[in-house]
Image (cartoon, rainbow, N blue to C red):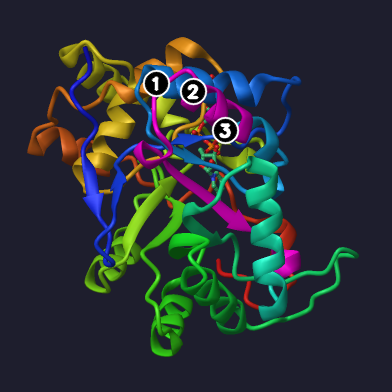
Amino acid sequence: MFKKVSKVKLNNGFEMPMIGLGTYARKAEPGQYRQAVEWGIELGYRHIDTASCYKNEQEVGEAIEMKIKDGLVKREDLFVTNKIWNDHHAESEVIPALKNSLKEMKLDYLDLFLIHWPVSIDAKGEDTAIDYIETWKGMEKAVNLGLVKSIGVSNFNEEQLKRILKHANIKPVVNQFEINPTITQHKLVDLCKEMSIIPVAYTPLGLISEARPEFIGKDVIKTDPKLGAIAEKYGKSRAQIALRYLTQRGIPVHPKSFTKSRIEENLNIFDFELNKEEMNIMESFNLNHRCVPGRAFEKYTYYPF
Ligand SMILES: NC(=O)c1ccc[n+]([C@@H]2O[C@H](COP(=O)([O-])OP(=O)(O)OC[C@H]3O[C@@H](n4cnc5c(N)ncnc54)[C@H](OP(=O)(O)O)[C@@H]3O)[C@@H](O)[C@H]2O)c1
């Protein structure tokens, strides 16, 4: 049996599970998202992370509906995160986009709604340069209408976080960005914590992507013998050690998998603890390498990296 997944308290009093099932995939077979989310809920995940741009809201929603129908969970047991895409950043577009996501997922509310990226782009790929402060006003409306319980941001840098805090009536509860042993992000993590904003780790397994060929061969999470030795000591996998390293820093994680055994494995990280020396070894893998550099957004106003 798994040790119970711990939760983190958000700055508005709501609680969020420390692990959520990621659902982004570059390619998927029909039904694959639905199957992964069904397995996830059956295995004990209570937090699901999706986004309108993942084009899987319908399948994710169907899986949730199915597991509620089965009597396995109630809606209030689940924490569902979704994100607004870059082409709906005008204040007036936020609520319609959110309502569309809720309709796709057959849900009455979201637990957490994020601005996916600070950049704003129209359907033709033109830079609309809409200030994310304007988008935030629409996000605040979503809370006031009771359509979402909490709002937050994703891929925001230090300056953007400070700026949003200056203008916000409702504070963001999280900033979701890439954190893993090859991009440890201490500066941004510390700033989030100072601001009572929870830093949430996407791409927590840090598997080096082909987007950065210069880093291939430095795939320490897959290959480093020191990491391997830590994994062996605890009878865990390398992936579990990477996830444990993050949660032990107080950072919630969103690993994605379509493989049932891995979905299960990734949840099973709450029954052991890395010691200080092992945490230091994990820290030594930092390369400040981004698996998700958001290259496609480089030319736009408010590009964060
Ligand atoms: N806000 C944002 O801009 C943003 C950006 C990126 C990601 N995200 C969110 O974060 C989630 C996770 O990020 P990600 O999908 O990029 O990366 P990830 O979760 O770090 O890695 C996923 C990859 O690792 C494999 N994997 C999963 N568990 C494993 C294990 N135990 N051992 C070995 N391999 C394993 C998966 O393969 P299989 O599926 O084949 O098992 C998949 O190829 C996304 O799904 C999404 O929800 C958000």
Query: Which of these two is toward me, 217 or 282?
Result: 282
Tell me where the magenta segment starts and ends, as one range: 61-88
| Residue 227 covered by magenta stretch | no
Q: Is residue 110 left or right of residue 239?
A: right
User: What residue type is disc 1 on?
Assistant: Leu
User: Could you tell me residue 16's position as x and y percent?
Assistant: 31, 48
- Does label 2 or label 1 sit earlier along the sequence? 2
**Contact (Cβ within 8 Å) of mark 2 with mark 1:** yes
- Of all residues, the one furthest to the bottom in this rendering is 167
CA separation in Å, label 2 and label 1 = 6 Å
Which residue does the image show at 51% across and 53% down from the upper left?
109
Q: Is residue 244 left or right of residue 208?
A: left
User: Could you tell me residue 99's position as x and y percent?
Assistant: 67, 58
User: What residue is shown with label 3?
Assistant: 216
Quadrant position of the C terminus in the picture: bottom right
User: What residue is shown with label 1?
Assistant: 72
User: Could you tell me residue 285's position as x and y percent?
Assistant: 33, 40
| Callout 2: CB less than 8 Å from ligand 1 | no
User: What residue is shown with label 2?
Assistant: 67
Which residue does the image show at 63% across and 41% down from the upper left?
106
Q: Is residue 114 left or right of residue 79?
A: right
User: What residue type is disc 3 on?
Assistant: Ile
